[in-house]
Amino acid sequence: MSIPSPGNRHSLLDRDHSILAFNERVMDWARRPDVPLLERLRYLSIVSSNLDEFFEVRVAPHITAAKANEQRGLYTAQTYERLSDKVHQLVAQQYAIYNDELLPLLEKKGIKLVSHGERTTSQRRWVKDFFVAEVQPLLMPVGLDPAHPFPQVANKSLNFIVRLSGKDAFGRENEIAIVKVPRILPRFVRMPQPKGSRQALFVSISSLIRSHLGDLFPGRQVTEFSQFRVTRHSDLAVDEEEVKNLRTALRKGLQQRHYGQALRLEVSAGCSEFLSGFLLEQFGLPEAALYRVPGPVNLVRLNQLIDKVDAPALRFESYNAGWPVQLTPGQSYFERLQQGDVLIHQPYESFDAVLGFLREAVQDPDVLAIKQTIYRTGAKSELMELLREAVRRGKEVTAVVELKARFDEEANINYAERLESVGAQVVYGVVGLKTHAKMLLVTRREEGGLRRYAHMSTGNYNPGTARLYTDLSYLTADPLLTADLDQIFLHLASQNRLPRLNKALMAPFHLHKAMLEKVEAAGAAAAAGKPASIVLKMNSLTDEPMARALAHASQQGVKIDLIVRGACVLPAQVPGFTDNVRVRSVIGRLLEHSRVFQFRIDGQEELWLSSADWMNRNMLRRIELAWPVTDPVLRNRIVDECLLAYLHDTRDAWLLQPDGTYVPASQGGGSRRGKAVLHSAQSSLMALYGTKG
């Protein structure tokens, strides 16, 4: 699937289909025999989670166009049909892996999901007792009639639809009932172990309830039933120009999010046409939005099963991040930064060092002020507690809290209120723009006057994801760069015009234009016969002007390597269009998240780190930051670890083809993973920096 451009015979790839292709690559980890079995199950769960978000955020305009039978424009009935066909194929592959590969392998390892038909008499008795004691009291079946209309069904909740024969207590033949399954109920329950057995036996909540649906309707017969789950549009839309209080408006929006436009309906594979048709009509969905699945309608909840199994041999070996090589435990961060900048490559090196920097700033009586952006910090954030403690110690604390961080809105609202409650200055950035830049600025009184110290990052201040995402943290006392950050914080708080910055680039003002200019400069140099190359590492490349600028530079002779984990709309090595562009995606145990931009023109190199992907939203609708790395030692390290290592990856890398498909980098000579020694950038870096024990 591609997007034509007026006046250009070459097309870019479709963003939504590229997102689905990314999920195919993630799903490959569920197939890989070299991946521990429970981790394979987890990757299958990740794909389901990704697809949930894909529907919640990306599908609404497609389905709206389909229902209106739109024939022109970016979203049409045809684009929805093609997208739907692709998702159906992906889901079919997903359940085939689940049923045909993973469940049999789990059973061989003594882990079994026991269906109703497989349960022994004693197991059925135990399940019945559990249902009566723990489940039935929480279920409230609703029989549908004019006084009991179809109930509100929350986004991604588990439900049952039941068809009944006979009459109700009032002599009426209302045949349809709905049973909502509370989220508080565990999705998998461990059954008692048979004597002398080491098996881990489980029953799913859906199997447990379906076995006893009849108990919920005494005096009537269940003639047919199905589990079902609806996915709804969940991207909050708040008119920031109109609302008086963004925080209050978002709180109201959060209450409505669970009941947005219906986009997808999942039912059991055996669901009758009568029941599925009834549900499609209730939710106002076309037939293509119906997904019949041979298994649980929510594979995301497989994480609960994984967590209940005590089998270390079936998981990844635990990894202990090393202490950053540039830092000495116990040494003052301020003293160290006076000697030069510090790079922390997460999660190979520990994120605890970043918290240590903030902790020292909070405890140091000479620190006068702390300013920080907050996007995603995770639950029970130590960082937030440190900022509150800083206020209590009399320091000036300014927090730029992004309330519109998707699916973290409620947590950030709560954090904002807790910071305000102790006297911190909390601002919400700029109306209409998300603050996505990751910045921490410390102002300290020293002998020569006030001095600033800063932390910048390609990733979030979240200790949880910092163990799973690859990111670069950068600590500096550079006077020019820290002065830039001070001006940016002042701009975000005061809304004053941003002055010219010394080193940093900021979106939406400079970053997009500056990156385009660097690509164009490389193209002009190559056209003049000078050597020029570009290597970019990011999560997504979907900005059309930037993609076309790269294509044009390729035509001028620039050698371009793109390391793009997720969606990439620029096809690789299309004759006459992107002959000199190579695109690879690395999908590994860790989620690739760092953004690194290298430009080499006639022997001169520029290297930039950034919080931004090359997406229209990042460049033009967000507050983003990019900064240059000028220290030659740090620059070489970043090139070696973040660019060259990934360009030589043959185990976890995929290569983009001209038609938009991806093939494994190891696919030379046929086998997906043959006898040749394959190189994994992530494994090599984990071995380099990890500690034992």
Image: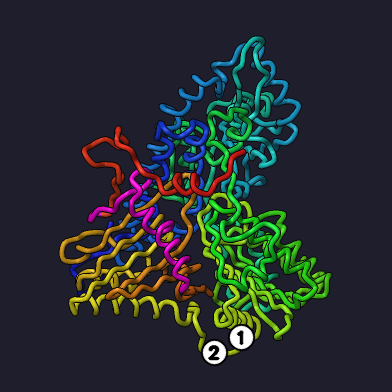
Location of the C terminus (image quadrant): top right
- 648 part of magenta stretch: yes
**Viewer-proximal residue, 660 or 36?**
36
Tag 2 and tag 1, C-beta contact below 8 Å: no
Indicate whether 268 appears above or below 396: above
Quadrant position of the N terminus in the picture: bottom left
Q: Amino acid at mark 1?
A: Gln
How packed mark 1 is, by other alpha carbons closer than 10 Å (few <14, some 14-19, many 20 or more), is: few
- Image spot of residue 266 (x, y percent): 48, 41
Mark 2, Cα crowd under 10 Å, few <14 / some 14-19 / many 20+, is few
Mark 2: secondary structure: loop
The answer to whether residue 166 is visible is: no
Vertical position of residue 224 compared to residue 24: above or below:
above
Image coordinates of residue 294 in percent, x first then y, are: 45, 31
Per the rendered image, the range of residues in magenta is 630-659
Q: Residue 459: x and y, percent?
A: 54, 61
Number of numbered discs on residues: 2
Instruction: Give the residue at x 80% y 73%.
Output: 365
Query: Which disc is residue 495 wearing?
Result: 1
Q: Which residue is mark 2?
A: 499
Rendering quarter of residue 138: top right
The quarter holding residue 187 reads top right
Q: Secondary structure at mark 1?
A: loop
User: In the figure, 286 relative to 519: above or below?
Assistant: above
Amino acid bearing label 2: Pro
> Does 241 appear in magenta?
no
Q: In the picture shown, does residue 108 fall above or below 32?
A: above
Q: Would residue 508 be visible to someone looking at this image?
A: yes
Q: CA distance from mark 2 to mark 1?
A: 12 Å
At x 61%, y 86%, the residue is 495
